[in-house]
Image (cartoon, helix red, strand yellow):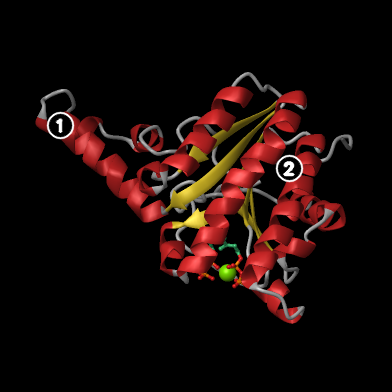
Amino acid sequence: MSTGKMIPQHIAIIMDGNGRWARMRGKERSEGHIAGMNALRETVRNVAHAGVKYLTVYAFSTENWGRPQAEVDALMELICKGVEMESEELVRVGIKVQTIGDRSRFSDKVKASLETIEQMTAAGENMTFVLALNYSSRSEIATAVQKLAQRVAQGELKPEEIDEQMISSSLYTSFAPDPDLIIRTSGECRLSNFLMWQASYSEFYFTPTLWPDFDKAELDKALEAYAARDRRYGLVK
Ligand code: IPE
Ligand code: IPE
Ligand code: MG
């Protein structure tokens, strides 16, 4: 951990470019996802080591179901494998795993894997590692609005009592502070339906590096860039 430098409390990453990484090497897209998983393993370790308290990664969007079935299957398989291979190490280093997104669409096997890793790592206090799975920011907001509307309909809540804090705490991410830094790899400069409410005052960092190539040096560059930002929140300094 460096001294006196502004360190984000929460980093969120849109891990993009696995497919292009594979194509450049004449490999299957699924091999790109395996390489991406290795980059993720290292990044979790490096981010925790930097003193960051929350790391959220976009691992599967609601839109990603529309990819070829073989790729979707490979990704599901990788989720289960990753859980199997990493849970003990995550427990050892005190990292707690949580998920955001709609889990109902996953197979029983994937659901069971996710429940296992959440239970095993629940006592972790060094960092919370959040996997966004079958996640969509718009559907997250729509679901939150439904929940609040139901409470209004039941007479438990007055419409004028609904404030920003109440919306924040009705989202999947209620347990975490808003991301300070959002990183997207592979050169794309868009959110792709990720954390739109939560990103209101996030700092963005875009890099052309493809996700499987995102290593400690790349993370350090992102942290340096963040440390040099001037977060004004609409105020005058
Ligand atoms: C990101 O890499 C991983 C997931 C979306 C699951 P991509 O698979 O989107 O890689 P590109 O964008 O096609 O290169
Ligand atoms: C966003 O990447 C979703 C994840 C990283 C899981 P995509 O590759 O799916 O997004 P688009 O299609 O480039 O917007
Ligand atoms: Mg992509």
- Is residue 160 rendered to the left or right of residue 50? left
Are there few (<14), some (14-19), or many (20+) residues within 10 Å of tag 1? some
Q: Earlier in the sequence, mark 2 or mark 1?
A: 2
* Mark number displayed over residue 123: none
Considering only vertical position in the picture, is 9 above or below 81?
A: above
Question: How far is mark 2 from mark 1, CA to CA?
Answer: 40 Å
Q: Which residue is mark 2?
A: 44
What amino acid is found at the position of numbered circle 2 in the picture? Val
Residue sitting nearer the eye, 186 or 116: 116
Residue sitting nearer the eye, 76 or 157: 76
Are there few (<14), some (14-19), or many (20+) residues within 10 Å of tag 2? many
Image-quadrant location for residue 34: bottom right
Residue at x-position 78% and y-position 33%: 51
- Is residue 212 rendered to the left or right of residue 179? right
Q: Is residue 147 visible?
A: yes
- Is residue 26 rendered to the left or right of residue 136? right
Q: Which x, y percent locates residue 213?
A: 79, 63
What amino acid is found at the position of numbered circle 1 in the picture? Val
Residue at x-position 45% and y-position 39%: 111
Query: In the rendered image, which quarter contains the N terminus?
Result: top right
Q: Secondary structure at mark 2?
A: helix
Image-quadrant location for residue 24: bottom right
Considering only vertical position in the picture, is 62 above or below 98?
A: below
Which residue extends farthest top? 123
Q: Which x, y percent locates residue 161?
A: 24, 30
Q: Which residue is mark 1?
A: 152
Q: Which x, y percent locates residue 20?
A: 67, 75
Q: Secondary structure at mark 1?
A: helix
